[in-house]
Amino acid sequence: MLCVGAHAAQELTPNIVTADAAPDTVATSLMPMPIFNFAVHNVAFSPDGTVLATGDGTGMARLWNTQTGELKAAVQAHTNWAFSVAWSPDGKSFATGGGDDAVRLFDAANPTQPLKTFLGHSNDVHAVAITPDGRQLVSAGDDRHIIVWELATGRELLRWRAHDGPIPSVSISPDGATVASGSRDDSIRAWELKTGRLKHELIGHTEDVLSVRFSPDGKSLASASYDGTVRLWDAASGRAIRILKGHTNRVFSVAFSPDGSRLASAGDSTLRIWDVATGQQLNVITPGGAVEHGGSLIAENLSAVAFSPDGTMLAVTSTTGITSLLEAATGKVLRRLVPNGSGPAKLRP
């Protein structure tokens, strides 16, 4: 394992579970935790759509077969809280950011040890993204800084203080020239990736900005916030295009369909699908319902969403450790991904 960077984070000895392991291996590796610790914080499809990566509050990163729902592998990526996952463009590796202040890069085919550990943040790393050319990795988190790394060597190329509050989300434009950041200081900022120069500040949200995403053509930016709204912005000018209202509580995540025509937003207990051109709400999906924990029913609040590369599936994650794969056109639940024994609750029929 290669460790790079100046900041000393805790060294990690990963716990690995592969498809050949006993089904309850994951469960025996974890200590009992409060229910919120099992929340799945982020989800990402591999570039070919065959594998889904998730990161959760126990520090585990898991790889799932999207066609069968089988757990392919699981790794103790961080000592606590695997907040973010991102794939390399070739699908051969994935990166995670965690609550131990570290970013780690894993071989997707054999994630037994990190290929690299990037040390430089002084607090939780909530966001990681890899540039479209696969050469650089961008990370951000509670220390208010954005760091740009050279992926091949792990060398830190650039860092800057980007916000006055923690940064839960970053997104890189399809041309690799711009990185957008959403912050708990209620703002969104667009930066020149090569220099860290501020290009635009997007003001409109009245509470924490939890998710930002560029559209596939790079012309628009979507955002989600604690204020219960989803917003669309013109990426070139930073001008607000429209506000999408429908969620009744905090919105945690947004994702564009591959063709850019639809936007999915996850928050409260609903997944909502929007027409990007008109702002019309196309569908409201409640994939989870309730889970049983300690004899009580607990609402399954949604925490992250992603479209598959071909646009036919949606993956949505929850604060109760359950990830659902849905048919994008109808919202029909295709598969439930529930780690044996590591989730806090049993899904109610």
Image (cartoon, helix red, strand yellow):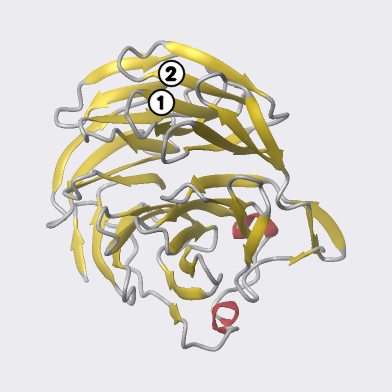
Judge the density around disc 2: few (<14), some (14-19), many (≥20) Cα neighbours within 10 Å.
some
- Please tell me whether residue 182 is drawn above or below residue 70 in the rendered image: above
The quadrant in which residue 169 appears is top left
Mark drawn on residue 286: none
Pick the residue in front: 16 or 248: 248
Judge the density around disc 1: few (<14), some (14-19), many (≥20) Cα neighbours within 10 Å.
many
- Please tell me whether residue 147 is drawn above or below residue 347 in the rendered image: above
Left of 215 or right of it: where is 291? Answer: right
Q: Secondary structure at mark 2?
A: strand
Q: Earlier in the sequence, mark 1 or mark 2?
A: 1
| Residue 47 x %, y % | 34, 55
| Residue 211 x %, y % | 48, 34
- Please tell me whether residue 301 is drawn above or below residue 54 in the rendered image: above
Q: Residue at x 36, y 59 (%)?
A: 48
Look at the image and tell me in which quarter the N terminus lies.
bottom left
Q: Residue at x 36, y 35 (%)?
A: 216
Pick the residue in front: 274 or 143: 274
Mark drawn on residue 233: 2
Q: Residue at x 60, y 45 (%)?
A: 329
The Cα–Cα distance between marks 1 and 2, rounded to whole angstroms, is 5 Å
Look at the image and tell me in which quarter the C terminus lies.
bottom right
Left of 77 or right of it: where is 339? Answer: right
| Residue 40 x %, y % | 56, 55
| Residue 172 x %, y % | 30, 36
The quadrant in which residue 117 appears is bottom left
- Identify residue type, mark 2: Trp
Q: Which residue is mark 1?
A: 221
- Identify residue type, mark 1: Leu
Q: Residue at x 14, y 57 (%)?
A: 152
Q: Secondary structure at mark 1?
A: strand
